[in-house]
Image: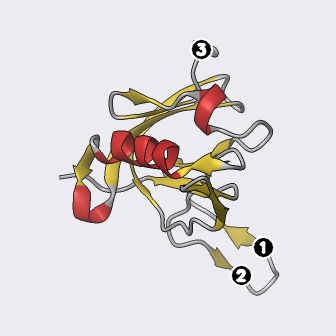
């Protein structure tokens, strides 16, 4: 399929690359997963790769993001949670290895916004690292 003008969608929300993804910070890949790998007495690893390759997407927000901008980003992500208490959602991400998109059920992992300071009554943040982890089982 190739790149189609966006890097990340959470549900129906396309994360604006030029506004919320700091240049040089986007990293997206799929993790190889094995079923009960083991190492024999000679040191050889025995693997049975499973079909699902779990998605992982990480990026940082730009520096000096304001409280209003952070709220906008998080509210749009939260509006697309399928299970809010688990921060679970459907993520579509561009995967450079495939030159294509992968869509999976994922969750937004814990993150820690760190304030840079307040100026003119507005909070500004250092870059915030957000990660979506895929491969989540869905009933």
- Residue closest to the eye, 21 or 81: 21
Residue topped by disc 3? 5
Percent of width and height locating residue 30: 60, 46
Furthest toward the bottom, the residue is 41
Residue beneath the point at 24% across and 57% down: 84
Report helix, strand or loop for mark 1.
Answer: loop
Q: Judge whether residue 58 can be spotted in this image.
A: no
What colour scheme was applied to this rendering of the protein?
secondary structure
Residue that carries the numbered disc 1 in the rendered image: 44
Depth check, front residue: 61 or 93: 61
Which residue: 78% across, 73% down? 44
| Mark 3 residue element | loop
The N terminus lies in quadrant: top right
Q: Which residue is mark 2?
A: 40
Q: Are marks 1 and 2 in contact (CB under 8 Å)?
A: yes
Relative to 70, is 30 on the left or the right?
right
Q: Residues within 10 Å of mark 3 (few under 14, many from 20)?
A: few
Query: Could you tell which of marks 2 and 3 lies nearer the N-terminus?
Result: 3
């Amino acid at each position: 399929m190739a790149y189609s003008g966006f890097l990340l969608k959470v549900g129906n929300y396309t994360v604006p690359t030029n506004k919320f993804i700091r240049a040089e910070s986007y990293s997206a890949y799929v993790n190889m997963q094995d079923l009960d790998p083991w190492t024999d007495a000679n040191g050889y690893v025995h693997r049975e790769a499973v079909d699902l390759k779990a998605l992982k997407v990480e990026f940082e927000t730009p520096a000096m993001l304001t409280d209003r901008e952070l709220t906008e980003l998080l509210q749009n992500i939260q509006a697309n949670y399928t299970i809010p208490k688990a921060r679970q959602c459907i993520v579509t991400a561009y995967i450079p290895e495939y030159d294509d998109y992968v869509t999976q059920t994922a969750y937004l992992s814990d993150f820690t916004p760190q304030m840079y300071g307040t100026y003119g009554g507005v909070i500004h943040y250092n870059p915030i690292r957000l990660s979506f982890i895929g491969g989540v089982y869905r009933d």
